[in-house]
Amino acid sequence: MTIKTRFAPSPTGLMHLGNARTALFNALYAYQHQGIFLLRIEDTDLERSCPTFAQHILDDLRWLGLHWQEGPEVSAINSHYYQSQRTSIYAEYYQQLEQLGQVYPCFCSPEELDLSRKLQRTAGQAPRYSGTCAHLSPQEISHKLAQGLQPSLRFKVPKQQLVTFTDVVRGSQTFNTNDIGDFIIRRADHTPAFFFCNAIDDALMGITHVLRGEDHLANTPRQLLILQALNLPIPNYGHIALILSEDGNPLSKRMGSQNLQDLKTQGWLPEGLVNYLARLGHSYQADSYFNLAELSQRFALERLGKAPARFDPQQMQHWQQMAIAKIDETELWAWMGNEVQKLVPTALQTQFITAIRPNVTTPDQASHWARILFTDDLVPQPEAQLILTDTDPEFFKQVLAALEVAQADYTQLVTTLKQTSKRKGKALFMPLRAALTGETHGPEMTHLLPLLGVQRAQHRLQIYVQ
């Protein structure tokens, strides 16, 4: 059997980390088995769906390095993978269900349904459809249609049965049909309900495994009932834990739900992001930096966690730093952006990259160090300013004298200062770094002083000897 997974987003907004992780897990599982990773655009919500968002989804997946073998722009018939262009297919299956007596028209208004749900909640019951329209006679249906009422189409759920399946992440699952209630598969405007067209397409497209968020778990028994009624193949379902913030709440934009377009603009590298997401709710035996092929080889359904995954911004930064350490100089130089490329002399490009590579995670940080090293507009940070204010001007006179001899050799400069100033440790290094860079932390001064240059270093030190 050929493994086939899918990613089926709705183009109603930009992709965020949760979407990206779902796509990644499905892709990794397919790649691991030399299978097929399919992309389908679920754009049946005509009011909210947008072609621009659909294109962003394609672009974002390619940016992450996730390439689909079936779907838009890679298959012969592009339209097969946009649900808005598959309405005739869904109509065939509505008709089949009607012939089987598995569905009925429902004329209940949204207001009536809302009131029914409120009454059920007040009575301590789980809200489900009460079956008001389940027993309408053909004459009653004809009368309502003659009045111009547009019905939705409900699936008739059998009573007192158990729906069971084995979730590839969560194990055995059982649902009582009495707890489900008859559900809508076609809205009154004739658009299909999500879980109807989603299930039909998975069956028709030969999807063998569906990995999706646990918020879809309640949809699964409904989809199983639909597929069983139509005698269509059923995929293996796996419901992965949702991503929460560190304090256990839903992710806010500040805490990790940024969309991929923003992350791209901010300078996050796809290789690092993929390494982080692959470990968000999934464990690897080795905590090493892997390329996509290595991640897929080591991916395992049994290592997908059942507990909610916690977003950790420090871990995301860690994998970003790992990615920065791995990419070549040409890519890193392009990543750093226009300001760095304008400020850093071509002859010093390699030295600059070597100096700051271990200490930056964004292009903005690279620009910050370029301004420190190659412009005269230095404003010390508050912490650095406190150190400079508390340091005896005599120390900076000694630094200037030592600099005359050592020039840009930072090791020799420090050796001399230890002898002349009788300082060591932080008492020596901190005011020296603060005066030369305006910072209390950063890249190694051994690399920074040659880039800064003796003349600019002297100019900065002069400020503190007066």
Image (cartoon, grey):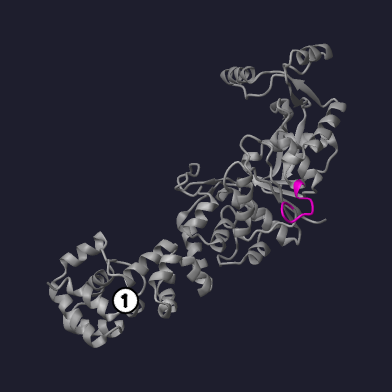
Quadrant in which residue 41 is drawn: top right
Q: Residue at 33%, 72% (x, y): give it.
A: 374
Instruction: Please report the bounds of the magenta region as a residue range.
Output: 71-79
- What residue type is disc 1 on? Leu
> Does 301 appear above or below 184?
below
Q: Residue furthest bottom?
A: 405
Q: Position of residue 461 (x, y in %)?
A: 20, 74
Split into 4 quadrants, where in the image is the C terminus?
bottom left
Which element is circle 1 on?
A: helix
Can residue 359 be seen here? The reply is no
Quadrant in which residue 277 is drawn: bottom right
* Horizontal arrangement in the rendering, residue 381 relative to residue 19 (left or right): left
Q: Position of residue 282 (x, y in %)?
A: 60, 55
Quadrant in which residue 346 is drawn: bottom left
> Does 430 appear above or below 219?
below
* Horizontal arrangement in the rendering, residue 147 relative to residue 425 (left or right): right
Q: Residue at 44%, 47% (x, y): give it.
A: 254
Q: Position of residue 187 (x, y in %)?
A: 71, 28
Judging by the rendered image, the residue that carries numbered circle 1 is: 452
Q: Residue furthest right?
A: 99
Q: Residue at 34%, 79% (x, y): give it.
A: 446
